Amino acid sequence: MSGIVGNLNYLKSRIPASVKLIAVSKTRPVTDIVEAYNSGQRRFGENRVQEILDKKDLLPNDVEWHLIGHLQTNKVKIIVPFITMIQSIDSLKLLSIVNSEAFKINRVVDCLLQIHIAHEETKFGFNLKELSDVIESPGFKILNNVRLCGVMGMATYTSDMNQVRREFVNLSECFKILKDKYFIGKIHFNEISMGMSGDYEIAIEEGSTMIRVGSLIFGERK
């Protein structure tokens, strides 16, 4: 059994069956992704559109690609035909462009709303007030080719796990507020994507339904 397969099996034994595992394959060679795929993993996360394009045709068609990094508007047209989920929607403009490109090919694209929960200014995302303004805007109501499935957030890069937990609690609370106010009865609005290799256990304790794990599967990046 390879290290990747063993790591995946161990990780899956530690997370509830209800939690989706996104294997973060950014910078990893296709051979590593194939190993993970052959062990049963189907969901993979990438930060960059170009890296997905470089890899996707070398892999089976049933791979589910999740874009987890910042998406530039000029890359939307390229990714919309095949992406499984865009986890990093951080503006109404971006959401509108995704909707427009999806409409052209008669597709509905699953998306998550990225919420800024970290203390680091370099991270992208809405705050709750901005999100409320977006959802209540006239432009939002005509977006029929995107399906909002929940929220995503990235905690501060820190060794202070109490701070990380507070940020995950904040994201879960934001999800609940949005669900109760705008998406009650919408069964597809059910995802909280939070937690990575160093903090996924805390994330799951605080309500994560989707974790994004790279180094615990593929090893530390060289």
Image (cartoon, grey):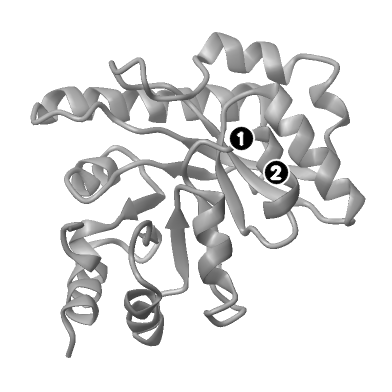
User: Where residue 112 sits in the image (x, y, percent)?
Assistant: 57, 39
User: Where residue 152 sits in the image (x, y, percent)?
Assistant: 46, 37
User: Where residue 219 sits in the image (x, y, percent)?
Assistant: 17, 64
Separation of disc 2 and disc 1 at Cα? 7 Å
Q: Which residue is mark 2?
A: 76
Q: Quadrant of residue 217?
A: bottom left
Q: Quadrant of residue 178?
A: top right
Marks 2,1: beta carbons within 8 A: yes
On the rendered structure, is 121 left or right of 7?
right
The image shows residue 38, relative to residue 129, as above or below, that is below
Judging depth in this view, the residue of 119 and 21 nearest the camera is: 119
The image shows residue 153, relative to residue 117, as above or below, that is below
Task: State the SS at label 2.
Answer: helix
Residue 172: which numbered mark, if any? none
Residue at image point 37% right, 62% down: 25
Q: Which residue is mark 1?
A: 72
Judging depth in this view, the residue of 65 and 170 nearest the camera is: 65
Residue at image point 50% right, 45% down: 191
Q: Amino acid at mark 2?
A: Val
The image shows residue 63, relative to residue 65, as above or below, that is below
Quadrant of the image containing the N terminus: bottom left
- Classify mark 1: residues with Cα within 10 Å, few (<14), some (14-19) or many (20+): few
